[in-house]
Image (tube, helix red, strand yellow):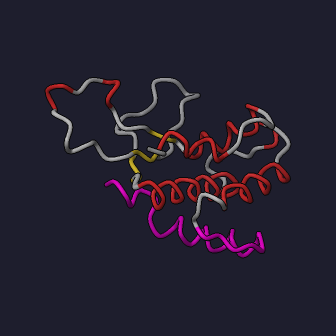
Amino acid sequence: MPGSVLGFGQQQAFADWSRKTGQTWDFTVDSLDRLEQLLRARFTGWDDLPAAEEPAVMVPGWYLGEVLNRAYGTAWHRNPVEPARPDRPRTPFVQLPPDPAADDEDRDEDDAPPVCNPFTEIRGLLVRGPDDHLRDAVTRYER
């Protein structure tokens, strides 16, 4: 079900993680800069990242998704099929709802609302280097 994919368990994990960081997290786009600083200080590269399901990756990923949900109206979704390749993420993603004004007959793949896998964005941040920023994930939703 969109919007509640991660549920209460993730919210509790966020509360625990937030306390451990000693910072206040307000779910604003501006807070992504602090999140990025925290991640870059903790992980120096891809090899430092724990498994995708570890709280050190899942909680920041959930937070990024929630920032997008609150700032741009995206909602959580789960991929309905297992990934074809093992290197493809199975984690939830956020997506804008379809444009109700668009005519279904005229829609094609290029008209699909933008999608963001926040967990992939977190891992990719360290792969793509210092010129890549978490804030870049929000630009696709700005109108």
In the image, taking residue 136 as reference, residue 10 lies left or right, namely left
Q: Is residue 25 magenta?
A: yes
Considering every residue shown, the one lying at the far front of the view is 143
Relative image position of residue 40 (x, y in whole percent): 81, 48
The x and y percentages for residue 86 are 55, 28
Q: Is 44 positioned to the left or the right of 93 in the image?
A: right
- Is 34 on the left-hand or right-hand side of 66? right
Quadrant occupied by the C terminus: top left
- What stretch of residues is rendered in magenta? 1-26
Nearer to us in this view, 95 or 80? 95
List x then y, in percent, for residue 3.
Answer: 37, 58
Q: Quadrant of residue 4?
A: bottom left
Give the camera-side residue of 125 and 137: 137
x then y, percent, for residue 128 = 73, 31
Q: Quadrant of the N terminus?
A: bottom left
Horizontal side, residue 66 vs residue 81: left or right: right
